[in-house]
Amino acid sequence: MRIPSFSITRHVRLSHMLLVCSVLAPLPVWADEDPESLDIMERQMEQLQQQQMALQKSLQAMRQQIIQHRAQMGGTAAHGGHPLEVTGSGGHVRGGWTPTEGHTATPSQTAGIDPMARPRIGGHSDPVSELGDQPTYESVVAHREEDLISHMANNNVGPHNRETVGAQSAGALGSKVFHLGPVSIILGGFFDAAALVENRQVSSGIFNYWNAIPFRNSSNFHTTNFNGDARYSRFSLMARGQLNPHLTVAGFVETDFGASAETTNPYESNSYVPRLRQAYLTLDDSRANMHFLIGQAWTMLTPDRVGIVPRQESLPETIESSILAGQTWSRQWQLRVVKDFMNHRVWTGFSIENPATIYDTTGFGDDLNNGEYRLPGNSGNYAKVGSNGVGLSSNTTNYSNEIAPDIIGKLAWDPTWGHYEIEGLLHFPHDRSVINGVGENHTAIAWGAGGSMILPVIPHRLEVRLAGLAGRGIGRYGSVLLPDATLRANGAPALLSSAQTTAGVIAHPNKVLDVYGYFGMQRSGRSYFDSDGTAYGYGNPLANNTGCETEGSEACIANIRSVEEFTIGAWYRFIHGQYGTVQAGTQLAYSRVHTWGGMGGAPTTSLSEIFFDFRYLPFQ
């Protein structure tokens, strides 16, 4: 028996009108006079959102009835548009599609309906789509891509849960959407109160600076340290506009207080200054499946979780703001172009990014003048690798000479199980030398290749993450910041081999608990020469390491060969509701540093740490 379409249409329109009337009903006058009434108003808003969801379920049930009857009559499938737009605390959903993990359409759901016979909702010009209709990319880039995009690829990895620390590190936004005319505003961030106890004195707070872990010759090796601060509290904002049904423009900015000015006083005011983490513009075209990004963001080399999507970078759940030894990452200016294929399962990306080169100048003496280092031979011989900042740049920081941007390419694949990607980059270290009064420019070609994967052992409950990068002259893309190059006798860059890798197991036993364990490693090669009885370069066997084991001695070159870190931790969300989320975490970390052998051997050192953290996420 055929169900008359006009009766369903009348029922749906009536329900929709009742909902709209309830939304537009005037708020009580006393809401402006009594602050306590705000709680009541918020509860009313929640009830309205629940009514919206109930209406959506009713629509789905009616569509399913239509599908079943049309299937019995031998109808054919027909895909419709996006007639229904529901706004809830989690964002927007179009096309009557609810983002349910693991949702796939059944054959009965894909049975057809004549588009002309389908009811229309709320005066929309598009017909209602069937229950199994796949969402188009408009529902991703125009609304909550960090929530919805993985459901389109359905890789069983899923997007970041916005309450996890990995999501917060990547720049996750909150679950509330505000509107200023045609522009949508989404807020993110958290209030942070972290502390650590470490068995060495490393004055870097919760930012792990492995290069500064002391050896036994330093008194800091024998001193424990406690440090606590709130300067990694974070604020982020996205403004987004829909230019047309398939073209979206958005701007994103994220800040914290991780920077330190010359006036910072750790003994009284602890006045750390704001710093820029991310600031970029995106343009997404869902018709052409093209995505553009320009500005400062996580480098495209950073492992991703879904496709090649900003704010979906796969970052560890660690408390330490330096993330993890061996992690591939950088936040820098870039121009990125991405295209996806095969229903958003295959992604290709190309990016040009701001370059930088870390030089090791062991044996070449101290900085002579503004990035100049002495070369063997005539006392006037030198190599110039950079210049100190001027104007609004830091005049105590040496910015390396660069001739071209870094070039990065990535291929990502989201099958039905897991996320996989491969990547490569080219970098062009550039400097100038002056030997016997004759100047010459030098350019080297550095390169790297790597990849990552996420294996959802138990989808959304237990996953394994693996990542790695190897090459020459790319040490700065690892958390340890090992050098990219040293210098040759003629002042040209001498590239150092580099490798970094991470492995992690992350478990979500329930909605309030996250448990993790990671191993990370970064290592560097060596390049050296001897001249006039002096040892030059990185990892030189003639380097003086004779005093590394004697407290008070300065005879300890100790060029780092590798750094390893083992860490475990957990986060517990003990408050979660309409006022946000409060969570507490703890982490144990052990790092070990190995050096290249020299005169006196190859000394090692280590660092043990216990981290504690409390975070309030008002928008999640």
Image: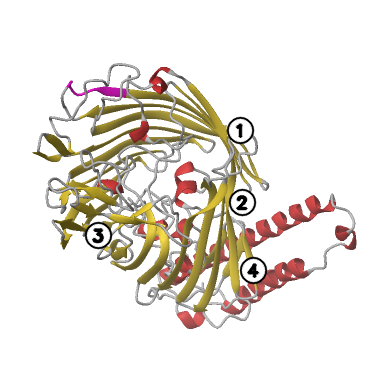
Q: Which residue is mark 1?
A: 267
Q: How far separated are the C-alphas under marks 1 and 2?
A: 33 Å
In this rendering, position of residue 244 left or right of residue 505: right
In this rendering, position of residue 173 left or right of residue 550: right
Q: Which residue is mark 4?
A: 179
> Who's the residue at 50% across and 74% down the image?
82
Main SS type for the magenta part? loop
> Who's the residue at 10% across and 34% down the image?
533
Whichever of callouts 3 and 1 sits on the residue coming sooner in the sequence is 1
SS of the residue under disc 4: strand
What residue type is disc 2 on?
Phe
Which region shows up in magenta? Answer: 600-605
Q: How far separated are the C-alphas under marks 4 and 3?
A: 35 Å
Q: Which residue is mark 2?
A: 619
Circle 3/circle 1 CB separation < 8 Å: no
Whichever of callouts 4 and 3 sits on the residue coming sooner in the sequence is 4
* Disc on res. 411: 3
